[in-house]
Amino acid sequence: VTLDKIRLKINEDARNEIQIEVDALHANAKYFNAIIDKINIYFPVIEKILEEENVPTDFKYLSLQESSLIPDAVSSSNAVGFWQFKSTTAKTYGLNINNLVDERRNVVSSTRAAAKYLKNSNFVFDNWIFSLLSYMTGLTGAKSILDEKFYGSKRMEINKNTHWYIKRFLAHKIAYQDEINKESYNDNFTIYTNYEAKNIEDLSESLSVNLNDLKSYNKWLISSELPRDKVYSFLVPLKSKNLYSQIKSSVISKVKSFISSSKNSLIDEKIKLIAEKKMIFLNGLPSIIVDSDDTMDKILKLYSISKKSFLAYNDINSNHKLQIGIPYYFVNKRNKGRVQTYIRRKEESLWEISQIFGIKLKKLKKFNEGNLSNKIILRKGIF
């Protein structure tokens, strides 16, 4: 068994102890499968953050050991959340706990904090196994029971005298590692970083995501009000539709309602034409969804925009043929998207995706250099 670059030799006594725990984890098939379902949702997020923080991704099993991936888990000692932080330690590592939020329940924020805690310990021990133990005992507690001569060790023996917390971690790793198939990871979730919405209802409406689903996967929110003291990340369920389809459907419905209610009123013809062209905001930018009646000349005239600017804003040239159902912009697109990833359909080009999410094409290409998968990266480092 290995953890990062540390090779672990497990002797017979320890192996028997670990096997008992592994068997216990496998004993209830219904519970075990429920954990696998949680793994498929949360591990993609946890793994990415651990990688970004240069912490071995095997520490994902520690979150499993600590909380069974239950966001609002509470221990008998009042440790809370995915990584079971007590309030003092949580605040030390930048997690907010107040009448609006408890970030210990936020998979993004709490994983980032746990990674920093483990890195701080590893700076002292240069040994991830010792850093693991410090997560339970605290740094001072671990130093008091560990032998300094093993600091920096790359080979260790796990025996009957090894702390139970380490053996329990190994049991979780062994019990689940062969059951995890990254191809089964749930792609119907993404991380959304909120900059604008003031409450959970507004966010639900703007993303066209069911309010109860949004609350269910973001139990760190205590109030419907969204705090403005910093930028928070949400786990957003996309279900079977991609985010763009949901936004488009919602906005078009609202535009049709507006047009219908305005038919008998005195409304400037040009304003009505613009409304009928279904102007919407994607990535916070004004755009229209092109239909079969549109030509470039009509759009340029209607919106009083120069052809040179329109071509530049949309990463197209003068020979471009407008594509039905694709959004076109009236300002420069942004350097990154508002969601983390998008599952690309076979027929979609990177240009189409850059239009759907309002991202400059050259930035999207840079994000996805060497990316051969169908999971397109829309922004870097938002966790």
Image: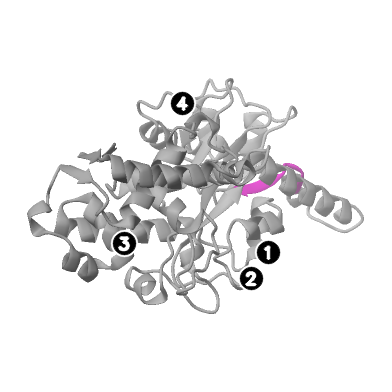
Residue 277 visible to the viewer: yes
Image quarter hosting the N terminus:
top left
Residue 176 in percent (x, y) is at: 46, 39
Q: Amino acid at mark 3?
A: Tyr
- SS class of the residue under badge 2? loop
Q: Earlier in the sequence, mark 3 or mark 1?
A: 3
Q: Which residue position is annotated with label 3?
A: 135
Q: What is the crowding at mark 2: few (fewer than 14 residues within 10 Å), some, or many (at least 20)?
A: some
- SS class of the residue under badge 1? helix
Residue 127 in percent (x, y) is at: 18, 51
Q: Verify CB contact (< 8 Å) between mark 4 and mark 2.
A: no
Foreground disc of the pair 3, 2: 3
For the record, the magenta segment spans 275-281
Q: Is residue 317 magenta?
A: no
- SS class of the residue under badge 3? helix
Q: Earlier in the sequence, mark 3 or mark 2?
A: 3
Q: Which residue position is annotated with label 1?
A: 201
Distance from Cα at disc 1 to Cα at disc 4: 34 Å
Q: Verify CB contact (< 8 Å) between mark 2 and mark 1.
A: yes
User: Number of marks in the image?
Assistant: 4
Residue 332 visible to the viewer: no
Picture quadrant where residue 288 is located: top right
Q: Which residue position is annotated with label 2?
A: 224
Q: What is the crowding at mark 4: few (fewer than 14 residues within 10 Å), some, or many (at least 20)?
A: few
